[in-house]
Image (tube, grey):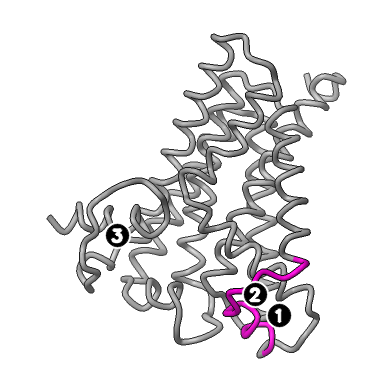
């Protein structure tokens, strides 16, 4: 029973997928971060299903790209985009860490949040439209959705917290941090290995992009905010997703120019 409640906690918190709403407890939140990557599995399957449908219907590239762009937002309910927007406002303020943390808690959407969100959607839509979605690319992107959530959960259980309140702190405090770190670290390494094995240069570039964004996540959160928060976790997920897809397209373009054999 606790196993299914643990999954339900992660699904209810990190997605818009209908599911039972269990009462949060120490027991069902202990490993809920380990269930977080399951949302990535749903995103990957939805990516594959929509692409297969669009190719079967001979639909225009723009329609296929628009659907792919919207899938992660519909699956997650935009929870990570909310964090991305708040963090964009805070970073654009160039204020001290204390003030930046206050901006994260402000429910109002500032100008820089709107600008960064528009920029993100234009870039993501363009990538979704331009990537050649063959089986290898779809598999790599499906695994990427899972990998970024493994890394995000690992960070919550490992990186210093900016404050002693908020959802990120709640999940971190309730987690069995040692076991969660090991489970998510091993899962991330295995996923990265499969991506490199299956995707070759495409998968390798995506793994490197995820590692780079994770490092930047740690540096920016520590220097600019004094640690991570739930909003910063969303900022990481959205950036990792964008950069991994960008790496995928970059390698495809280089393969087209015969840079790789």
Does the residue at mark 2 contact the one at mark 3 (Cβ under 8 Å)? no
| 138 shown above or below 76 | above
Most extreme residue toward the left is 1
Question: Does residue 248 show up magenta in the picture?
Answer: no
Does the residue at mark 2 contact the one at mark 1 (Cβ under 8 Å)? yes
Which residues lie in the magenta part? 99-112
Of the image marks 2 and 3, the number of the one nearer the N terminus: 3
Q: Distance between the residues labelled 2 and 3?
A: 26 Å
Q: Distance between the residues labelled 2 and 1?
A: 5 Å
Q: Name the side, left or right, on which 243 lies relative to 7.
A: right
Q: Name the side, left or right, on which 238 lies relative to 9.
A: right
Q: What's the residue at 63%, 22% (across, down)?
A: 133
**Which quarter of the picture shows residue 68?**
top right
Q: Name the side, left or right, on which 242 lies relative to 168.
A: right
Q: Nearer the viewer, residue 60 or 55?
A: 60
Is disc 3 placed on a helix, strand or loop?
helix
Q: What's the residue at 22%, 53% (across, down)?
A: 20
Q: Distance between the residues labelled 1 and 3?
A: 30 Å
Q: Mark 2 points at which residue?
A: 221
Of tags 1 and 3, which is closer to the observer? 3
**Which quarter of the picture shows residue 109?**
bottom right
Residue 251 coordinates in the image, percent (x, y): 76, 31
Does the residue at mark 1 contact the one at mark 3 (Cβ under 8 Å)? no
Q: Name the residue under label 3.
A: 9
Residue 228 coordinates in the image, percent (x, y): 57, 75
**Which quarter of the picture shows residue 172?**
bottom left
Question: Does residue 111 show up magenta in the picture?
Answer: yes
Q: What's the residue at 46%, 61% (across, down)?
A: 153
Q: Name the residue under label 1.
A: 224
Considering the whole magenta stretch, tell me its main secondary structure: helix
């Amino acid at each position: 029973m606790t196993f299914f409640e643990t999954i339900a906690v992660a699904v209810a918190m990190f997605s818009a997928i209908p599911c039972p709403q269990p009462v949060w407890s120490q027991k069902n939140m202990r490993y809920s971060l380990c269930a977080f990557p399951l949302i990535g599995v749903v995103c990957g399957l939805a990516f594959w299903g929509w692409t297969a449908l669009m190719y079967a219907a001979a639909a225009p590239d723009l329609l296929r790209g628009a659907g792919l762009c919207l899938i992660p937002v519909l699956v997650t309910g935009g929870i990570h985009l909310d964090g991305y927007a708040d963090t964009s406002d805070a970073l654009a303020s160039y204020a001290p860490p204390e003030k930046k943390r206050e901006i994260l808690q402000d429910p109002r959407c500032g100008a820089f949040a709107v600008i960064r969100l528009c920029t993100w959607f234009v870039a993501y839509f363009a990538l979704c439209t331009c990537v050649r979605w063959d089986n290898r690319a779809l598999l790599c992107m499906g695994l990427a959705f899972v990998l970024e959530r493994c890394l995000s959960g690992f960070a919550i259980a490992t990186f210093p917290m900016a404050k002693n309140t908020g959802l990120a702190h709640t999940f971190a405090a309730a987690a069995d941090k040692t076991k969660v770190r090991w489970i998510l670290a091993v899962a991330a390494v295995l996923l990265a290995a499969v991506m490199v094995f299956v995707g070759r240069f495409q998968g390798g570039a995506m793994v490197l992009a995820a590692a780079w964004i994770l490092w930047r996540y740690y540096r920016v959160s520590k220097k600019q905010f004094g640690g991570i928060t739930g909003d910063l976790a969303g900022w990481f997920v959205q950036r990792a997703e964008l950069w991994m897809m960008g790496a995928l397209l970059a390698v495809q373009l280089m393969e087209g120019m015969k840079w790789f054999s």
